[in-house]
Each structure stands twice: as structure tokens, then as C-alpha cells.
Image (spheres, grey):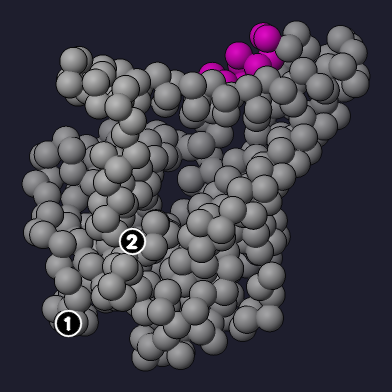
């Protein structure tokens, strides 16, 4: 980027980013994060805190490729923590869904068994993901092309990649039919619109945010598509055709795929050129499924979270219910980590109004 381009870059670009949660939005800027949700009574509940990423604590964790893997793990932990926190804040208690058997197990065996069950559920989720996105495409492609001699590996990799993308798109489409998920997608759109409004320098109001785009090139959806495209390129160099061996190598190469995807996201966050626009396009198209146009009350939630994440600029939040002080010690292992550095999450958004694109 030239000096002239740097001078023309808005200082707000890349300063804040976030994610949609249950009935709300989490925003993060620097080491500060703020979670805002809509309560049943109509009010806004807020929880905030601070955390310093491992990438800022240890130089080794900020080495290219490695930092992408570190960030991916932190992103997963953050997503789970924020979803759990939002459920607590809107009053969803696990006890409400416990059967008599669940209560008996909990009383007899305590939390250790329940933690074990959660661990098993997590492992099963990983196994299912590996089966759907690695093993199944590899198996189907081998059925189509046969064993082969490795000469047509690029074609094999392309077919596998198309199958993976197809499975992903179908999955998103189907879960998007669920009312609760569709509502979360609207909060996802509210997050993008409020960030775009802030980066354009407009006054942060629901009315102004509604005129901004709901598509953001640095969204997690775009990141997934980048990884899918990279997996096609990397798989083209895997010489094995045996389903199990090829799948095992793909799994072992996942950290490299994640790391390279993260490096692209960082690059795209600092450059707005033809290359980044082309590579970001599939993710933007996919966001027509993962984001929906929000109403003003949802935009109000996203704007509240954004302002809460930048208190130095907007001051203390007013008219909200603060859900306890959850500032975290940077050495606390249970503290909430960031998804990406702010500059990675919130790169320049498309400023075209997309209010006509909702289903």
C-alpha cells in the first residue's frame, strides 16, 4: 500500500469487529469486548470485559501461519463462550430442560460426568465434521474417478472441493430455515450494518445503519470459503488416492490451510484491490444466506455493543442493564479470547445499500 493510499484510509477501518449471538451481538475493539442482548421485557442487557490474546503475549504465537491456528482456536472458544453468555443473559437456564434422569445423574455423579458428556459431544461433533467435509467428498470422488495413478490429482481435488462447497451451502441453507437461526442471521446482518455505518463515519443510529451494507468481506463466512478454496489447491498436491490415507493427510494439513486462510484475511484487510475482491466474492455471495436484513431493534442492539466496545470514543453506555462486571485478568485461562485482531475482522465493507436482497 502506497503512502498516498495510507493517508486516504479512514482511521475507523478495521477498528471493530464482532459476531452474532442468541438475541444479540458481541463487538470487540482492541482488547475490549462488549456483549449486548435483548431481554424479554424489551430492555438491553450488557456484559463486557477485556482479554489479551496469546498472539500479543508470546512472539512465537504471532509467527505467520502459526498465528492463524492460534486465532482459530481462540475464535472457537470465543464463539462458545459468547453463545453461553447470551443464553444466560436472556434467561435460558439449563435446568429448565433437565429431565428427572438428568437430575438424578447430576446428583449421583456430579459435574465430572456432565463435563465428560460435553467432551464426548465435542469429539462427536469433530468426527461428524471430518466425515462430512473430508472423508465423504474423498470417498465419492474415488467412486467417480476410480483408483487412478495420481495423474489427475488436480481434477480429483477440484471435484472434492466442489462437493465440500456443496455440502456447506446445503447445510447453511437448511439450518437457515429454522426460525431461531434465521433470527440470529438477522443479528448477523445488524452486526455488519453497524460496523459499516461506523466505518463510513455516519452517526450511529438504527436509521443510518439500515442504509449500509449487510455484506462484509472479512466475515467468518468469507474465511470459510477461503479455506475451502485453499483446500482444493493443497489437495491437488496430495499424491495418494486411497480414501483413508488421502483423508488422513488432508486432516493433518488442516493447520496449514487455516493458517494460510488467516494470512489472506489479514492481507485482504489491508488491501482493497482486484485480487482481494475476486477472492472475497464467493464469501460475499454466501452471506446472502448467513445474513438477513435486521429490524431497528436489532440494529439498536448491535450499535449498543459497538459503542460498549469503544468506551474511550463513546463514553459509558446509558439506558442499559449491566449484567455484572466481567473484566478478566489477562492471565486467567478462562478469560474470553478475541476472534481476530480488530484490523482483521473489520476491513472495508461494501458501501452499496443491499436492503433489497433479503428473503
Say few, some or many: other residues with alpha carbon within 10 Å of mark 2 (under 14 / 14 to 19 / 20 or more). many
Q: Does 252 sit above or below residue 349?
A: above
Disc assigned to residue 26: 2
Disc assigned to residue 17: none
Q: Which residue is mark 1?
A: 318
Circle 2 — which element? strand
Say few, some or many: other residues with alpha carbon within 10 Å of mark 1 (under 14 / 14 to 19 / 20 or more). few
Residue 4 in view (yes/no): no
The part of the image, by quadrant, that contains residue 147 is: top right
Q: Nearer the viewer, residue 346 or 78?
A: 78
Task: Give coordinates of residue 190: x percent, y percent.
Answer: 47, 72
Residue stretch in magenta: 244-253
Magenta stretch: includes residue 314: no
The part of the image, by quadrant, that contains residue 121 is: top left
Q: Earlier in the sequence, mark 1 or mark 2?
A: 2
Task: Give coordinates of residue 87: x percent, y percent.
Answer: 31, 52
Q: Does 162 sit above or below residue 178?
A: above
Q: Does 214 sit above or below residue 208?
A: above
Of the 4 image quadrants, the one containing the C terminus is bottom right
Identify the residue at image location x=41%, y=35%.
69
Amino acid at each position: 500500500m502506497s503512502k498516498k493510499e495510507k493517508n486516504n484510509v479512514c482511521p475507523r477501518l478495521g477498528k471493530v469487529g464482532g459476531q452474532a449471538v442468541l438475541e444479540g451481538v458481541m463487538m470487540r475493539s482492541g482488547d475490549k469486548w462488549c456483549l449486548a442482548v435483548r431481554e424479554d421485557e424489551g430492555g438491553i442487557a450488557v456484559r463486557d470485559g477485556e482479554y489479551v490474546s496469546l498472539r500479543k503475549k508470546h512472539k512465537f504465537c504471532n509467527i505467520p501461519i502459526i498465528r492463524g491456528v492460534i486465532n482459530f482456536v481462540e475464535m472457537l472458544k470465543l464463539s462458545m463462550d459468547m453463545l453461553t453468555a447470551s443464553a444466560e443473559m436472556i434467561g435460558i437456564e439449563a435446568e429448565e430442560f433437565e429431565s428427572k434422569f438428568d437430575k438424578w445423574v447430576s446428583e449421583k455423579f456430579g459435574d465430572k460426568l456432565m463435563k465428560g458428556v460435553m467432551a464426548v459431544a465435542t469429539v462427536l461433533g469433530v468426527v461428524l465434521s471430518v466425515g462430512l467435509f473430508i472423508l465423504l467428498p474423498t470417498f465419492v470422488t474415488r467412486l467417480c474417478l476410480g483408483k487412478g495413478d495420481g495423474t489427475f490429482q488436480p481434477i480429483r481435488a477440484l471435484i472434492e472441493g466442489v462437493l465440500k462447497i456443496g455440502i456447506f451451502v446445503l447445510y447453511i441453507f437448511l439450518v437457515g430455515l429454522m426460525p431461531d437461526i434465521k433470527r440470529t442471521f438477522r443479528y448477523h446482518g445488524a452486526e455488519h450494518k453497524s460496523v459499516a455505518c461506523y466505518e463510513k463515519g455516519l452517526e450511529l443510529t438504527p436509521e443510518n445503519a439500515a442504509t449500509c451494507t449487510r455484506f462484509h468481506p472479512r466475515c467468518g463466512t468469507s474465511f470459510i470459503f477461503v479455506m475451502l478454496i485453499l483446500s482444493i489447491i493443497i489437495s491437488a498436491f496430495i499424491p495418494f488416492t486411497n480414501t483413508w490415507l488421502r483423508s488422513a493427510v488432508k486432516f493433518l494439513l488442516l493447520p496449514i490451510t487455516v493458517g494460510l486462510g488467516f494470512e489472506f484475511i489479514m492481507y485482504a484487510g489491508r488491501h482493497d484491490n482486484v485480487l482481494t475482491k475476486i477472492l472475497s466474492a464467493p464469501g460475499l455471495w454466501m452471506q446472502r444466506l448467513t445474513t438477513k436484513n435486521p429490524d431497528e431493534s436489532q440494529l439498536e442492539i448491535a450499535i449498543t455493543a459497538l459503542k460498549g466496545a469503544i468506551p474511550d470514543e463513546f463514553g459509558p453506555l446509558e439506558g442499559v442493564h449491566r449484567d455484572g462486571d466481567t473484566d478478566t485478568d489477562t492471565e486467567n485461562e478462562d478469560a474470553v479470547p478475541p476472534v481476530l485482531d480488530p484490523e482483521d475482522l473489520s476491513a472495508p465493507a461494501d458501501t452499496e445499500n443491499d436492503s433489497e436482497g433479503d428473503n
